Amino acid sequence: MSIRVYQAPQSQSINSFLITLLDGTGSMCMEYEQVVKAYTEVFSYLGNEKLEYQFQLQLQPILPYAGVNGRGGNITNTFKELFQILLSNKYPKNITILFVSDGKEPFEIKVLLPFIKKMKDQFMIQFISLAIGDRFPNQISNILRNKIHNHDPNFQSLFKVKRNPKNSKNKIYQEFLLCFQQIKPLIQVQDGIVQINKPVLQTLVSPPSNLVISGSYFCAKTDSQQNEGIWGGNIQLEPKSTDKEVNQFIIGSISQAINDQIANNKSDNTAFQIISKEVPHLLQQIAQIQSSPEEQKKNHEVLVLLEELQSSNLQLKQMSENQLTQLQKGLFDHQVSLNQIINVNSVNIQKNTVTPEILNERLEEKYQQLINPECFQEPIYVNNQKVTLLQNTELIIIETLNNHIAYIEQNINNDHTQLLQDFISSTQESLIKVFSASDFKVEFDEQIVSFKQMNSLFQLIDQTIKKIINIQNFLVLVKKYQQKTQVIAQTDTSTTLFSSNDDYKYLPNELQILLKEGIECEDAEKSFVLIVDTNDSMINESQIAIESFQIQFQNIPENKKIILTWKNSKFQQYSLKQELQLQQQQQEQLLYDSLLEQFKALDKQYDLSIKRNRICMITDGLTDYQSIHKSFKVLKFHYSFQIIYLTIGSQLNTKIGNELKSKYQDRNLKGCPLLFNIPRSIVQSTQNSFKRILDTFNKRFEDIYKEFIK
């Protein structure tokens, strides 16, 4: 039996009915008008043979742009509404859905499955995606294509336009114009299905079928001894023998296998092994070379990619959605290097092809996966324990360091100053991004040890850059960090945080603050910062809270306590004399958009940067609480503080309580946020006097005061 590639007989070529879904959410504000302009330029020739919508929570006309209202999108609702429109009206049988998006929105495929079955019974569907920027929802796109597409699989179905905030409107327009022009030929399809005289495969990983799309490639196994032929209808088909035809089928098969693995959240490499087994037999059928040198180079890259996938050296589960988008585009796009994608994402790097640029991109990509973890990626486990964020960063440092060391050893006579500078700057910048995007806190001595070891590594690299240590000595000394598991047991785990100036000197400033916040020095001076939500929903509580605080904290010196108010997303220092008109006018000039700006303004008078601050936030959470939460996350990398929540009512109290219980599991840890509550029923009850409400606040502040003076 031999396997060969065939092409089904051609039928009438027609324009499929184009349905464009364009992301109309707020994040598209920079590109939207230019996308529509380019789209109209390319597809206006279709006239009424198209539907075009922008999507947010529901479908809307493509113009005017609706993103200015700031609403998010919902991909489930978008496709449900679209399917209802298509199924309730008469449209041509052949349709192409063009999905244009820049970011992930709510999606649940189970809701759509009943509609998809009806759609596939009624239509021949092509599904094409256009990704904008690096946050494109790749897995959602693959799920939709996997479930909806029932047309020829052997073509490019994913395109991408890079996002650059510096691009002019004309530059954006030109990039989308080029992309839509590449998509335009795909709208033309073969109108028909051909019956084959025996079960064949539309791709190497497709189920056997006697039906194939007109004009499409497929493969079949035949027995030459029995003189068995392949017939499409009443036409006997000859096997294809040019490299263009055979490689197009191979690429389509790999593309289908990648789509299937991403869409169905698979992690095995069986499909790639099936393709890899048959590819040599297909390549043997090539009798004529028609591909250009550029196309031949791409075909070779594809075969290298297949080897990496079937051997599990490249694991899709460990790639970010952005890298998966690049990979799927790169199967067809000569401008995208598959070799570079392999080197950035493979388990074992190809040392003979590595460059400093690839090393740096690989490093940044590894950290990016921690900053923006995605549902398709699997968490890492060591000894059946899920790896923590800090452990993950250590693993990345060791892996990327190993790659850099291997490159240095292979090129020992080169000057590696720039390579090391790039390593340390990229690593430190990435660490800042990783920890600032999380709620990480230093809670254990082992964490302090890890940061000390990081500091030692950065110091060693710094000394090598400055030529204090030569590269040969660096390679010897750096082995100690690579073998850090043996070093931990010998390291002093004293809780004295800043035992020497060198312990944390080489860490980024932001991480030093994080460490100082985590383990408190016994003699650290404290300040208390009260932030009172004075928005309209807090009208019954805010002034009483301030008066109660002044009573309970009267023994704390004025230079160690501060009252701030927060209203209309702005911070302001509260003054006892605020009722005076002149001072009110002065205060209005001192409104701050961010908590960080407010702290910097107060720093000169209160020395907040050198103190262990307690921040007590009084709010009901009904007015944009998320912006306050983000302010704390930014502030923690500049000032040391512990948060105390004094919530009003049950809604926010329950939310924060659940989050604290989930994160800290009722452990009594230093630095853990404290949570107190004022029941809203007490505040709102008409039976209770002002004194009753004040007494309730006094009890809470009495407890908070005791915590503060410990």
Image (cartoon, rainbow, N blue to C red):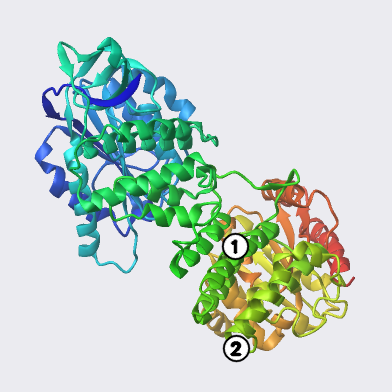
Q: Quadrant of the C terminus?
A: bottom right
Say what amino acid the circle numbered 2 marks: Lys
- Residue 467's tag is 2
The answer to which image quadrant residue 133 occupies is bottom left
Residue 636 or residue 327, whichever sits in front = 327
Task: Look at 59% across and 62% down and name the residue there.
Answer: 434
Residue 709 or residue 262, whichever sits in front = 262
Side of 545 where 38 appears, left or right: left
Percent x, y of residue 368: 53, 58
Task: Look at 51% across and 63% down and name the residue there.
Answer: 364
Instruction: Kindly state the secondary structure of the residue where label 1 is placed.
Output: helix
Percent x, y of residue 405: 59, 69
First-in-chain label (2 vs 1): 1
Task: Look at 26% across and 23% down and name the residue there.
Answer: 124
Task: Look at 54% across and 34% down and name the residue there.
Answer: 268
- Dot 2 and dot 1 residues touching (CB under 8 Å): no
Discs 2/1, front: 2
- Residue 67's tag is none
Q: CA distance from mark 2 to mark 1?
A: 30 Å
Percent x, y of residue 421: 53, 78
Label 2 packing within 10 angstroms: few (<14), some (14-19), many (20+): few
Q: What residue did someone put label 1 on?
A: 434
